[in-house]
Image: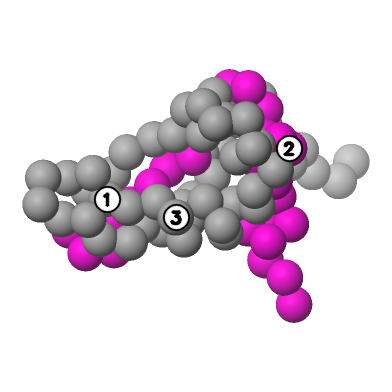
Amino acid sequence: MKGWKQNVRVSDLADNQRLELTCRKCGHVRYLTKSMICVVPEREFLFIDEVERQAKCRARGCKGSVRIAMVRLDEMSGFVGGLA
């Protein structure tokens, strides 16, 4: 069974979509956008899990592996109504 990281490519992300990278070693958090990932044009064809494997923590002296989570967009919200 595939997760969302194996199904979503960088090119599928909205221009304003942010990805949260959390270091598994030190807990440092940073955010990436589609434009930051696509500095090299070929990277837009990568799946999110491939980006996660290649990314490293940027905290001073850490270089640990990171976990990627998708930050929720404001216009997406859960169902609020009920049955009438």
Residue at which label 1 appears:
57
Cβ atoms under marks 2 and 1 closer than 8 Å:
no
Three-letter code for the amino acid on which mark 3 is drawn:
Gln
Task: Report the mark closest to the observer, 3 or 1.
Answer: 3
Label 3 to label 2, Cα distance in Å? 19 Å
Which residue is found at the position 79% from the left and 43% from the top? Answer: 82
Task: Calculate the distance from the C-alpha at mark 3 to the C-alpha at mark 1.
Answer: 10 Å
Disc number for residue 12: 2
- Left or right: residue 45 versus residue 58 is right
The correct choice, above or below, for 41 with respect to 84 in the image is above
Which residue is depicted at the point 17% across and 45% down? Answer: 59
Amino acid type at circle 1 is Cys
Question: What amino acid is at disc 2?
Answer: Asp
Q: Residue at point 72% right, 70% down?
A: 2
Q: Nearer the viewer, residue 44 or 30?
A: 44
Where 52 falls versus 74 (above or below)?
below
Quarter of the figure with the C terminus: top right
Q: Which residue is mark 3?
A: 54
